Structures are given as structure tokens and as C-alpha cells.
Amino acid sequence: MNDDITVVITCFNYGAYLPAAVDSATGAGGRTTAVVVVDDGSTELEALRALKVLPPEVTLIRQANAGLSAPQRRPAPATTPYQIVARRR
């Protein structure tokens, strides 16, 4: 098992789900070394509130809305090793 794991959570107006996703990623039994949330230009009030109260160990990257795949690729240069596992609703 690889100990160097970065969890990337993309968010576009998913304020209702973001806190649970972040809690799950940060509480992954000590296996997660980094959590990155990429906000793809959220405008929903609930999402904006959730983004403001992220834990200090979570890295937040904000960008203008760029579509579904752009926020998944955004943190790639900063994360090593790099692998994307996308979950779509």
C-alpha cells in the first residue's frame, strides 16, 4: 500500500456534500498525507460557506468555472504520485 496519498475533492456548488467528503478524506485512518479541494467557481451560498470553514490542513484551490474535467487536472503538478480517481454523480 502506498502511504503517499493525496485526496483531491472537486466542488461546484456541492455545499451539502463538501463537509462530509472532507471529513471522510481527513479521517482516513492516518493514510492520507494531503487533502486538496478544488472549487470550480461555486456560487451557491451553502458551498461558499462550506469552503470558508475548511480545516487548516486542507489546501483550497479556487478557479473560475472551467467545466467538469478542469478541476480534476488542476492539482496534478503539485501532487506526487499522481493518479485521478473520479466519482461523478
Image (cartoon, helix red, strand yellow):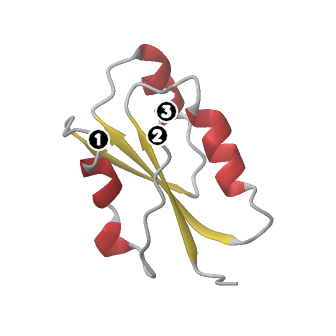
Distance from Cα at disc 3 to Cα at disc 1: 11 Å
Q: Position of residue 39 (x, y in %)?
A: 36, 40
For residue 28, above or below residue 39? below
Q: Quadrant of residue 68?
A: top left
Bin the neighbour count of mark 1 within 10 Å (Cα to Cα): few under 14, some 14-19, many 20 and up: few
Q: Position of residue 72 (x, y in %)?
A: 34, 54
Residue nearer the viewer, 6 or 51: 6
Bin the neighbour count of mark 3 within 10 Å (Cα to Cα): few under 14, some 14-19, many 20 and up: few
Q: Residue furthest right?
A: 29
Whether tag 3 and tag 2 are in contact, CB under 8 A, the answer is yes
| Secondary structure of residue under mark 1 | loop
Whether tag 1 and tag 2 are in contact, CB under 8 A, the answer is yes
Mark earlier in primary sequence (1, 2): 1
Bin the neighbour count of mark 2 within 10 Å (Cα to Cα): few under 14, some 14-19, many 20 and up: few
User: Which residue corresponds to mark 2?
Assistant: 88
For residue 3, above or below residue 78? below
Mark earlier in primary sequence (3, 1): 1
Q: Amino acid at mark 1?
A: Leu
User: Which residue corresponds to mark 1?
Assistant: 68
Q: Amino acid at mark 3?
A: Arg
At x 53%, y 29%, the residue is 50
Q: Quadrant of residue 28?
A: bottom right
Q: Amino acid at mark 2?
A: Arg
Q: Residue furthest top?
A: 45
User: Which residue corresponds to mark 3?
Assistant: 89
